[in-house]
Amino acid sequence: MEKKNQAMRQQPRILVIGAGMSGILMGIRLIKSGYQNVRIVEKASSVGGTWRDNTYPGLHCDVPSLSYCYSFAPRKSWDKRMSQGKDIRAYFEQISEEYGVKELIEFDTEVTLAQFRDGQWHVDTNKQQDQVFDFIITACGVLHHPVIPDFKGKDSFKGESFHTARWDHSVDLKNKRVGVIGTGSTAAQVIKPLSEICSKVVNFQRTPQWIFPFPNREYGEFDKFLARRFPLYNKLVRRIYDEAFDHGGLGVTEDGWQRALIQNVVKLNLRFSVKDKELRKKLTPDFEPLCKRMVISDNYYQALQRENVYLEDSPIEQIEENGIRCKNGKLHEFDVIVFATGFDTQAYMRPINVEGLNGATLDQAWAKGPTAYRTVAMPDFPNLFMIQGPNAPVGNFSLISTAESQSKYILKCLEHYKKGEFIYMVPNRQATEKFNADLVEAMKGTVWMSGCQSWYISDAGVPLSWPWGPREFRQSMRNPDFSEYEYA
């Protein structure tokens, strides 16, 4: 019996929820570490996460290609400095097969209930009930649940309408009149390709954004030759990008030269890219640059100045059967309405019903906004770890870099379990409360608190992102402080 228990500890049953970038990464780490009882469930029919769900025209990553791939599995060459969505999805498809992760995935499988009892997790899916696991690792992503505001009359529109994350490619947009609601990163990418095929494009702006002009140039044959022939070239360029991201991240958290540089660049970009003074006035935010997530584009301002493109900054009054009426009384008639209105970035693993110790529920734990212990765990929810959980640096770092640090942390916790000293581990409440109190205090020094509404802070005032620098995050994830956990 003792040998059986020891064998089970060496090979705990592990469930990974999600097969996007983070889930694939966690699967690779577990396989490389020798874990064999691993299952990955994915509610869709293929891997890729946000790069599977989003297929809108102009889709590309706003992180350089060489940084938006796993550090241990660089792609030899990319077509552009910031890769198109289809290329990133192809990369994750390739990696999931190459490292044997795809064999572990159950597609079209959605977790509905995760209940901790008798020292284990009991999990229900849409296909099977009461499956037992020792650990759950959630890799559900943050850009997963599309949000469409409840505009008055939304269902009365007679034309086609859809969210950018659910793009309807059956709709022919050639020479059509299209309204795009939203001015975030997605809208900044989609306006240009729409302006090239549509007869009319109106971009509805609730809040203007600061735009950072990072050219997304195509790599020529010589660039690709260097990348394929000299691996050190790729490593060097990636290192340069990573250093730039580290300093850019400091621009958010510290009032120094990094912040000043970025703020001056975006202001100059607006000044010299938009010739018309009235349009420039409409596009000028009333908040400090970096307060919201920076939009990166080298063609958004240019596309807005095309003859068939119009920026509407009057608030939307209602949607009618023929189009959108604004509060200034003007009715814009459309054939198609596109909602570039973002995601519920506070959903995390929801809508899964999660029940921890003594009947504690996720809804209760997050009643005042999502919180966590060091971005990866929560009190009352033993042996449950999160990648890209609450307070993870999802706004000012590369998500892949974040996931790599968190996955290594989780592996060290699993190794601690294998020593046979406990059945489950859970962060203690005192350490968690101290961490969150430190978050609130550190948030006061960031640009996010300078007077804007963003998804870095919840409606209840709870910090949702990492208020320190990139190096501090990597250091926090390097070695778990097991004295801040409780054990059974």
Image: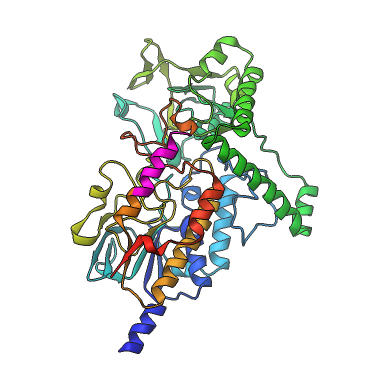
Residue at (50% x, 26% y) in the render: 176
Residue 144, how many percent across, how many down? 41, 46
Residue 13 in which image quadrant: bottom left
Q: What segment is highlighted magenta in the picture?
A: 434-445
Q: Is residue 377 visible?
A: yes
Question: What colouring method underlies this structural image?
Answer: rainbow
Residue at (40% x, 44% y) in the render: 438
Residue 347, how many percent across, how many down? 34, 45
Magenta stretch: includes residue 442: yes
Residue at (45% x, 48% y) in the render: 392
**In which quadrant will I find the N terminus?**
bottom left
Residue at (66% x, 18% y) in the render: 272
Task: Compare residues 119 and 178 and report the one nearer the observer.
Answer: 119
Residue 379, how many percent across, how many down? 30, 56
Task: Compare residues 99 and 457 and report the one nearer the observer.
Answer: 457
Q: Is residue 299 visible?
A: no
Quick check: 150 above or below 236?
above
**Horizontal side, residue 350 vs residue 65: left or right:** left
What is the number of callouts on the image? 0
Point out the residue furthest to the right here: 222
**In which quadrant will I find the C terminus?**
bottom left
Quick check: 432 above or below 179?
below
**Horizontal side, residue 67 vs residue 126: left or right:** right
**Horizontal side, residue 352 vs residue 24: left or right:** left
Magenta stretch: includes residue 405: no
Residue 121 in which image quadrant: bottom left
Residue 467, how many percent across, how many down? 47, 41
Majority secondary structure in the magenta region? helix
